[in-house]
Image (cartoon, helix red, strand yellow):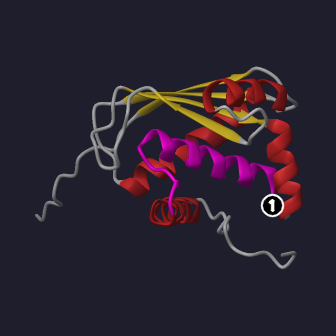
Amino acid sequence: MTRSPKTAPSLKVAIDVSVEAGDWGPKRPLSTLARKAVTAAIAELGLTGQGSELSILFTDDDAIQQLNAEWRGKDKPTNVLSFPAFPMKIGNPVPPMLGDIVMARETIEREARLDGKQVEHHVTHLVVHGVLHLLGYDHEDDSEAELMESTERRILARLAIADPYAVSEKD
C-alpha cells in the first residue's frame, strides 16, 4: 500500500461578519462570499497553522470616509480598508488575530458598474485584497504592487473570477 506524504492542515480562520450600514442585503450570502474568498487565499498561499480570526465589516461610504480620514488622513470614501492586528511581513507565521477589513457599499457598486464587473466578484476581489494586506502584502511601489496583483489574480482564478486588472474594452 502506498501512502501519500502527510501535509500540514490548512489554516483555519474564524470570520466574524457584521453589516453595519449600506444596502448589502442579508448577512448570510456575505458570510459565504467572505468564506470562499478567504479559503481560496489560504489555499493559494499554502497557509498553515493553529488558526486565526478575522473581522469583516460591511458598511457605507459615510462610515468608511470617517475611518479613512481618521486612520489614513484621506477625507474621502474608499472601497476597502484593512487594519492588521499585528505588523506582518509576507511569509511570517499567521498570528492568532489577522485584523479587520471594512468595505463600503456605494463605492464598491460604483466601481463595479464603471468597470463592467459583477458586484459579487468585485466584493470577492476586495476581500482577497484586504486579506493580503493583513498578511503583509502592499502596493506602495511597483514591485510590491506586481506581487500583490499577481497573487490576487491567482486566488481569484481559483474562484473562476476574471483578472480584475485586465484592461476592459471600455478603456
- Position above or below: 69 against 134: above
The number of discs equals: 1
Instruction: Confirm whether residue 128 shows in the render.
Output: yes
Screen quadrant of the N terminus = bottom left
Q: Residue at x 54, y 62 (%)?
A: 149
- In percent of width and height, residue 96 lies at 35, 26
Nearest the viewer among 126 and 41 is 126
Q: Is residue 61 left or right of residue 97?
A: right
Nearer the observer, 144 or 73 = 73
| Secondary structure category for the residue under label 1 | loop
* Dominant SS in magenta: helix
Q: Quadrant of the C terminus?
A: bottom right
The span shown in magenta is: 118-141
Seen at 18% across and 60% down, the residue is 4
* Residue 40 included in the magenta stretch of the image: no
Lateral position of residue 66 relative to residue 159, left or right: right
On the image, numbered disc 1 is attached to which residue?
Answer: 117
Which of the 4 quarters of the picture holds residue 44?
bottom left
Q: Residues within 10 Å of mark 1 (few under 14, many from 20)?
A: some
Q: Quadrant of residue 107?
A: top right
Tell which residue pokes out farthest to the left in this image. Answer: 1
Residue 25 in sight from this viewpoint: no
Give the residue displayed 30% in from the left and 43% down from the top: 48
